[in-house]
Structures are given as structure tokens and as C-alpha cells.
Image (spheres, rainbow, N blue to C red):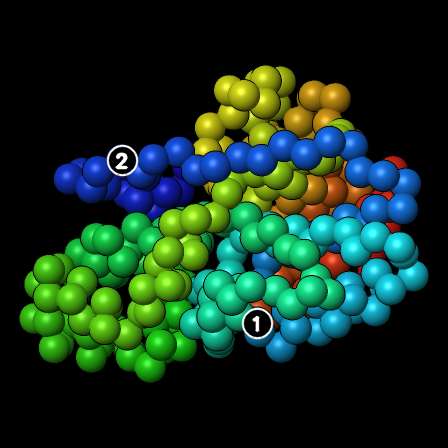
Amino acid sequence: MKSILQRLFRQGGARPASPPRRRFRLGEPGSDYPLYAIGDVHGCLDQLLDAERRIRADARQYEKQGLTILLGDYVDRGPRSAAVLEHLARPADKTLKRVPLCGNHDDVFLQFLRNPGQIDKWLEFGGRQTLLSYGMDAEHLVSRSGGDATLMRTMLREIVPAHHVEFLESLPVLLEVGDYVFVHAGLRPEIPMEEQRDEDLMWIRQPFLSKGPMLPKIVIHGHTPVDKPQFMAGRIGIDTGAYYSGHLAVLKIIDGKASIL
């Protein structure tokens, strides 16, 4: 069942529909070409930097650099959302090639920046910590703007850098590499890849979690927190709740074999 917040932000009245997000498809990775996936970050910059350090150290054993895919949800709940976006919005150095995907929290944050009249719902979704990471608390924003959405939007433009907004707008929603599909939440079971909706790719839980993709693909996803990474039929879930567990999972795929780094 869709959450109330999902319906509000996906169908928010006068808000214009967002254009579909990009999707990328790459060929089969070579036998010496590692793939790495990082679970939901949620404002945990220290854990993200540590995950990238582990990836760099592991990748040194291979001739080819490989590719690092981040599964989305860079903002909300954790303490340093603004710093995470600043880090990811900058080009990675030559030792790390990364592709950040869009999570539902990232998409909702972008929609909030466009339509801050729904601030109460966004704050309930973990947005309070994101706002604080930019140096402003919710009560101050509401009191200074008098609750006027247009004024709130102007204030938000002053504290959220334009390149953060551009980064959120640019995020693709899916990366397909050979038989592996990297996405934030999952796929609608049995639906062909080209017919999968952005909404499901960023929000779905059931029936994906119980059935898997029911396609000849292995889906690497986050979105649903687990105590430890789950290796299930047709899917691998790696959201280990970094903002409360302190652990950010990294999955490694090399020569068709997946393991936790």
C-alpha cells in the first residue's frame, strides 16, 4: 500500500508532474571489472567516506577500476545531508568512478524545494534533519515566512546551493549492467524493464520483497532496512539503516559473484 506521503508528493495537486528520470544500460562487465554498490546513506557522511575508502582499497587488486553505484537516499534522518550532497555533487577523483541513483527521499526533497507548502509532511519524513544540516530549523523557516510557500521557496534558495538542486534533478533512477539491475527500491514483479515506472523503482516494497523481480535479472536495492544484507531469490537488499546502525553496507560483484565488502 502506498504511504500517505507518497500519494501527497506524487499527486500533489497543483504541482506539475516531474519528467521521467534517466535510465542507463551497460553491457556485461568483464571478468576483471568489479562492481560495487553502496546502500542508503541518509546524511551519514563519515560512513560514506569510509565506504569509498574500502572500495578504493579493494579495487587496487584489479587492473580495471570498476564502477561504484550508490542506491539513493542521500538526505533525511542522518545529521549531514547537506555535506553528503556537496560531496556527491563534486566529481569523484580518478580512483573512484561512481554513479549515484535517485532514492525516494532525494526525489521528495527536490519536490519539497519546488513546493515547500507541504513542509509538515516532509518534516515527518525525516526532513527536519536535512533542514538543520543547511543551518536552518523548521520553526525558524515557518516563522520568518509566515507559512507562505512562495516566501519559503525564496528562503530555501538562499540556503540550498543551486548545484545541490541540479544534482538532485540529474539523478538517474536505474542502472542495468548485464544481468544486474541497480535501483533504489525494487521492480514491479513480472513487468518488462521498459514498462517499469519511476514511482515503483523509488518506492516499491510489496510485492517485490516477497516475490522478487520474477524476471531474468538480479536486482540490487536499498530502501527497506535490514539488520544485515539479504541475499534472496532474484534480489539483494543492502540498506542496513546507516543513520541508526552506524553501518553502511557495500556490495561487491566480480566475475558474476556477489559478496559483502
Q: Secondary structure at mark 1?
A: loop
Q: Residue at x 55, y 48 (%)?
A: 101
- Are the residues at dot 1 and dot 2 in contact (C-beta closer than 8 Å)? no
Name the element at disc 2: loop
Residue 163, by quadrant, is bottom left
Near mark 2 (Cα within 10 A), the count class, few <14, some 14-19 or many ≥20, is few
Instruction: Give the residue type that dot 2 points to.
Output: Ala
Residue 95 in picture, x, y percent from top left: 73, 65
Q: Position of residue 79 (x, y in %)?
A: 48, 76
**Residue for point 18% across, 38% down:** 13
Q: In the figure, 79 relative to 151: above or below? A: below
Q: Is residue 235 above or below residue 42?
A: above
Q: Residues within 10 Å of mark 1 (few under 14, many from 20)?
A: many
Please give left or right for residue 96 compared with residue 208 in the image.
right
Q: Quadrant of the C terminus?
A: bottom right
In the picture, measured across the screen, residue 16 lies left or right of residue 132, that is: left
Residue at 15% over, 39% down: 14
Q: Which circle, 1 or 2, is nearer the viewer?
A: 2
Badge 1 is on which residue?
Answer: 44
For residue 77, above or below residue 111: below
Amino acid type, label 1: Cys
* Picture disc at residue 17: 2
Mark 1 or mark 2, earlier in chain:
2
Q: In front: 219, or 211? A: 219
